Image (cartoon, rainbow, N blue to C red):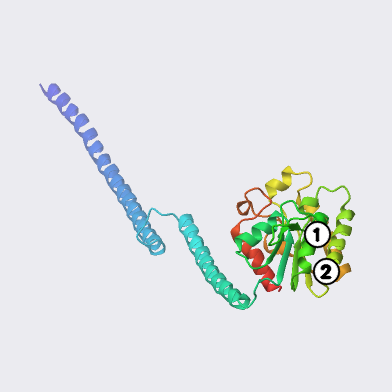
Amino acid sequence: MKKKKKIRKNRVISTVIPLVIIIFLGGIIGNKMASKNKKQDNVLNNFNNEEKIDNTNKNSIIPQNTDVDNNKVMENNILNIENEKKEDSEVKNVVNTSNEKKENSSVKFDETIAFIGDSRTQGFIMYNGLKDVQDYSYIGLTVDTAISKKFVKTNSGEKITLLQDMKERNIEKVYIMLGVNELGWSYPQVFKSKYKELIHKIREVNNKCEIYVQSIIPVTKSRDKSEKYFNNIRIKQYNQLIKEVAKEENVKYLDVQSVLVNSEGYLPEETSPDGIHIGKSYCEKWLDYLKNNF
């Protein structure tokens, strides 16, 4: 019996001791886990607090809309600045335009003013409503046919040359724009000599009038790329010849093209239905240029 009791006692001890050890170790591990969790909670709390501070700072930069990113806000700010500049520029342009109109209001294009030109000049006179000027424009007119062609109607219905008609009128200023229809001529120097001849003929019938020769207006980029002769390289060559004529004949050269072309030197596409002729708004710009160089 004593032996059996001893065995039982040993079994209890062998069972209890491991349990105590397990409980003890479990307490230590539990404390460590709690401490670790507390540290993690502190880290999370600190992170959340930093995030709140960061969000507060962001909200102070981007008020009311936290979904908008900084790039978008910057783009909007740039656009707003550009729009303000544009509006300011437009206001200035309106003021400048109105001042130009005031300055030019005294300039009158009446029956003492004559225009010699082709279909471009026809459009210029029509769009600007210049009903009182002497209109010597004709579709396809060139520097040689301007001398010889009978296209000016008299009161009796007879057709005479512009030089015959000019002889009977009190013309003080003559504006010439010719050259587009001559761009395909084989010898550009013939254009120059014929242009000079036209000036000589005008002076024969009226030696007191002022003569203005205008630059040929360039064509649009699309027209320029599709033409063999009606292109801006050719026009530039002919404008140089017109400048030479102006210098040699002591007449005034008007660089009309300077106010009608874009930064690339082309007539803007939207201003011309066919790449050569210009619409109303640009005809008005052309007229303003003439008034400023009257």
Q: Quadrant of residue 10?
A: top left
Callout 2: helix, strand or loop?
Answer: helix
Label 1 residue SS = helix
Can see residue 12?
Answer: yes
Residue shown at 58% from the left, 71% from the top: 97
How many numbered discs sit on the rendered protein? Answer: 2
Please provide percent x and percent y for residue 100.
61, 74
- Residue at x 80%, y 59% (from the top left corner): 239
Q: Estimate the x, y position of residue 212 in percent, counting from the top left.
A: 77, 68
Mark 2 and mark 1: span between their CA atoms?
A: 26 Å
- On screen, residue 104 versus residue 241, left or right, reads left
User: Is 165 left or right of 17, judged from the image as shown?
Assistant: right
**In this orientation, which residue lies closer to the viewer: 228 or 120?**
120
Picture residue at 14% right of the left edge, 22% below the top: 3
Which of the two marks, 2 or 1, is nearer to us in this view?
2
Name the image quarter holding residue 33: top left
Which image quarter is the C terminus in? bottom right
Q: Is residue 279 left or right of residue 210?
A: left
Up the image or down, 16 lies above or below 230; here it is above
Q: Nearer the viewer, residue 243 or 159?
A: 159
Q: Which mark, residue 205?
A: 2
Residue on which the image places disc 1: 239
Foreground of the two, 74 or 116: 116
Q: Amino acid at mark 2?
A: Val
- Closer to the chain start, of discs 2 and 1, is 2
Instruction: State the mark number for residue 2.
Output: none
Instruction: Give percent across and percent down for residue 54.
Output: 39, 59
Q: Tell me which amino acid carries mark 1.
A: Asn
> Which residue of the protein is positioned furthest toward the front in this rendering?
156
How packed mark 1 is, by other alpha carbons closer than 10 Å (few <14, some 14-19, many 20 or more), is many
Residue 109 percent coordinates (x, y): 66, 71
Give neighbour class at mark 2: few <14, some 14-19, many 20+ (Cα, 10 Å). some
